[in-house]
Image (cartoon, rainbow, N blue to C red):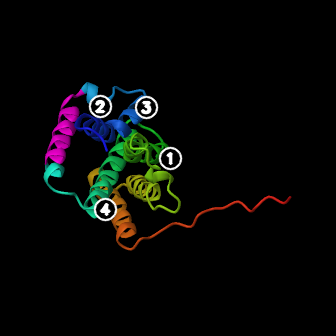
Amino acid sequence: QFDWLGVAVIAGVTAIGGGTVRDLLLDRPVFWIANPSYLQAALAATAFTLLYARHRRIPERVLETTDALGLALFGIAGARIAVGLGHDGVIAVVMGVITGSFGGLLRDVLCNDIPMIFRQGQFYATAIILGCSLYVGLIGLGLETNLAAGAGMLAILGLRIAAIVWNLRLPVFRLPPEDK
């Protein structure tokens, strides 16, 4: 349980966390400081969600679906920024993963939960990696940037939604037990 301010802080950190880390790593102005309208939009969305949740319980599937939308949108946004700065495709994919997942990681840590990205077998970061790789690959093949971005977002969203609906899990790598 959190008070209203705690919930607002957690929601705000979730909304701007990944992009903040990306911008710091890429040595560029932090997006919400350079353009406070991003922070205002995050605060407005937080306020709307808090007011709604005060009167109705938000189903887990809805939360998972909106998280999947965020992964798709923010993952490709991070990759696009890296590509726009002239970075290699691998860096673009890494920046997509950071942008898409780090806000949720911070949210889960603040809520004392195991971050989704670290849960065994969870099809989470892999969806971002595949979608951002598709985006980078399509750009490399000469596809127009917005079409490549749309394809990458649809891939991330489709993979994550499929994982939610059909409870898809990735195989878990385990080390063999030590011999005594």
Amino acid type at circle 1 is Val
Numbered mark located on residue 128 in the image:
none
| 48 sits left or right of 98 in the view | left
Q: Which of the 4 image quarters holds residue 160?
A: bottom left
Residue depth check, mark 2 versus mark 3: number of the one nearer the observer:
2
For image coordinates 24% across by 34% down, the residue present is 5
Numbered mark located on residue 31 in the image:
2
Q: Which residue is farthest right?
A: 180
Image position, residue 126 (x, y; %)? 47, 58
Q: How many marks?
A: 4
What crowding class fits label 1: few (fewer than 14 Cα within 10 Å), some (14-19), or many (20 or more)?
A: some
| 141 sits left or right of 144 in the view | right
Q: Secondary structure at mark 4?
A: helix
For mark 3, what is the residue? Answer: 26
Q: Which of the 4 image quarters holds residue 179?
A: bottom right
Amino acid type at circle 2 is Phe
Image position, residue 120 (x, y; %)? 53, 59
Q: Tell me how far mark 3 sits from mark 1, CA to CA.
A: 14 Å
> From what the image shows, is residue 23 above or below residue 163?
above
Numbered mark located on residue 90 in the image:
1
Where does the C terminus fall, quadrant-wise? bottom right
Residue depth check, mark 1 versus mark 4: number of the one nearer the observer:
4
Q: Tell me how far mark 2 sits from mark 1, CA to CA.
A: 22 Å
Image position, residue 20 (x, y; %)? 36, 33
For image coordinates 70% across by 60% down, the residue present is 175
Image position, residue 104 (x, y; %)? 38, 46
Q: Which residue is farthest bottom?
A: 166
Numbered mark located on residue 154 in the image:
4
Question: Does the magenta run of residues contain 38?
Answer: yes
